[in-house]
Image (cartoon, rainbow, N blue to C red):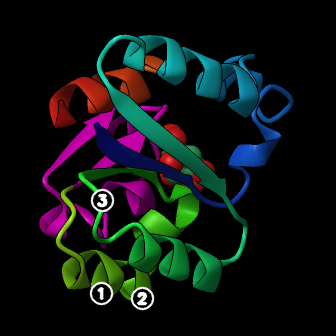
Amino acid sequence: MKHIAVINGPNLNMLGMREPDKYGTETLEIIKERILAAAEGLDIAIAFFQSNIEGELVTAIQQAGALDGIILNAGAYTHTSVALRDAISAVAAPVVEVHLTNVMAREEFRHISMLSAVCKGVISGFGADSYVLALRALV
Ligand code: DQA
């Protein structure tokens, strides 16, 4: 069995209510169910974690560091966090950076990712499907 962690950062607990024109109406719980459905039959155990706190996300990456993969939506910390970048660099697990929105089609400050260069790859712009595509990529 393979083990994958899905780690979500700040404000993603607000999905469903948060700017639905950009992020859609699916809650994080629904996205979780969709990921679990996509993993069915693939012999994968998935652990989910969400925090609004940067240091907790660093710890979650460290704790998932020996797993087979990490799917990470770091939210706004994507654009600012050297600490998250260093955490990704420090672990063996391949990390897929995901975004619900196409960050390159949004404000200029979102065009910069502190994380992409140390991730295995990036999937951005497909709503909740970004997570499912990331799972497929890791598989
Ligand atoms: C996001 C994009 C980020 O720029 C933003 O700060 C988020 C969500 C996305 O999933 O599209 O919180 O990571």
Q: Residue at x 81, y 42 (%)?
A: 14
Note whether 13 is above or below 101 in the view shown: below
Q: Position of residue 31 (x, y in %)?
A: 61, 24
* Label 2 with label 1: CB-CB less than 8 Å: yes
Specify the segment rendered in magenta: 95-124
Q: Quadrant of residue 39?
A: top left
Residue that numbered label 2 is attached to: 83
Residue that numbered label 1 is attached to: 86
* Label 3 with label 2: CB-CB less than 8 Å: no
In this rendering, would 54 be left or right of 19? left
Please tell me which of labels 3 and 2 falls first in the chain.
3
Note whether 69 is above or below 77 in the view shown: above
In this rendering, would 22 be left or right of 87? right
Mark 2: few/some/many CA within 10 Å (<14, 14-19, 20+): some
In this rendering, would 123 be left or right of 29? left
In the picture, the quarter occupied by the N terminus is: top left
Note whether 56 is above or below 125 in the view shown: below
| Residue furthest to the right | 17
Q: Give the CA distance from mark 3 to mark 2.
A: 20 Å
Mark 1: few/some/many CA within 10 Å (<14, 14-19, 20+): some
Residue that numbered label 3 is attached to: 67
Mark 3: few/some/many CA within 10 Å (<14, 14-19, 20+): some
| Residue furthest to the front | 1
Please tell me which of labels 3 and 1 falls first in the chain.
3
Q: Residue at x 42, y 88 (%)?
A: 83
Q: Give the CA distance from mark 2 to mark 1.
A: 5 Å
Residue 70 disc label: none
